[in-house]
């Protein structure tokens, strides 16, 4: 059964043929961040898919992860393509490296997930929060409900950020 919903007024739809993504977003709707773990090599993967990118195994299990990580990179959007985001510029799109599976399978690879920077209640981040975030900032996942069977995983600054730690930001 297709999964559908709305986020910031935009229609979302995951067709029946995309069972891996539908399952991922259904777990998010339950407030859980789960990733596929290959039963052959035990490595997790993201985005969800039918086979392991590391060993090509097709048997997997959905494994819960902490939903905590570090901003690996980001972009500040000032000219949105999607009309639903125009009222929210500027906003940040983050590439977050999860705490799980760091430097595996190699020192240059890890599980990294893209999502917007938001407040703890999943509203797009205001300017003062945007200025506080940068590469190296600690974040945790929060979910924005987008329908009965779908929620969007987003990122908010983690209160566990070490005191005095200054994230790196692109020069303005």
Image: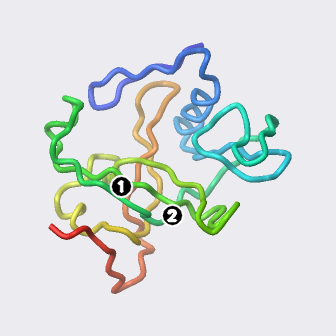
Q: Residue at x 40, y 23 (%)?
A: 12
Q: Is residue 135 above or below residue 95?
A: below
Q: Quadrant of the N terminus?
A: top right
Q: Quadrant of residue 79?
A: top left
Question: Disc 1 marks which residue?
Answer: 120
Q: Quadrant of residue 163?
A: bottom left
**Would you place residue 138 above or below residue 51 in this image?**
below
Q: What residue is disc 2 on?
A: 69
Is residue 153 left or right of 38 when viewed as pictured? left
Mark 1 and mark 2 lie on one chain; the one further toward the N terminus is 2
Crowd rating for badge 2 (residues with CA inside 10 Å; few <14, some 14–19, many 20+) = many
Q: Secondary structure at mark 1?
A: loop
- The colour scheme of the drawn protein is rainbow
Quarter of the image with the C terminus in it = bottom left
Residue 47: image location, x then y, percent: 57, 41
From what the image shows, is residue 164 above or below residue 103?
A: below
Local SS, label 2: strand
Q: Position of residue 138 (x, y in %)?
A: 43, 69
Residue that sits furthest to the right in the current view: 40
Give the percent coordinates (x, y) of residue 167: 33, 75
Image position of 128 with respect to 12: above or below:
below
Lateral position of residue 133 relative to residue 100, left or right: left
Q: Residue at x 40, y 40 (%)?
A: 144
| Residue situated furthest bottom in the rendering | 164
- Badge 1, how many Cα within 10 Å: few under 14, some, many 20+? some
> Where in the figure is residue 161, as x and y percent of width and height?
41, 75
Q: Residue at x 73, y 41 (%)?
A: 52
């Amino acid at each position: 059964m297709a999964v559908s919903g709305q986020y910031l007024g935009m229609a979302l739809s995951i067709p029946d043929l995309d069972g891996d993504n539908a399952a991922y977003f259904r777990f998010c709707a339950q407030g859980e961040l789960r990733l596929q773990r290959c039963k052959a090599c035990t490595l997790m993967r993201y985005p969800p898919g039918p086979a392991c990118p590391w060993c090509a195994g097709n048997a997997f299990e959905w494994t819960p992860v902490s939903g905590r990580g570090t901003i690996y990179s980001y972009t500040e959007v000032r000219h949105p393509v999607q009309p639903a985001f125009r009222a929210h510029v500027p906003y940040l799109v983050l590439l977050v490296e999860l705490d799980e599976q760091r430097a595996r399978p190699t020192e240059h690879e890890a599980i990294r997930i893209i999502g917007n920077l938001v407040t703890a209640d999943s509203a797009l981040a205001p300017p003062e929060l945007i200025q506080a975030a940068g590469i190296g900032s600690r974040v945790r996942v929060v979910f924005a409900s987008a329908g009965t069977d779908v929620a969007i995983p987003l990122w908010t600054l983690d209160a566990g950020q070490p005191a005095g730690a200054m994230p790196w930001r692109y020069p303005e």
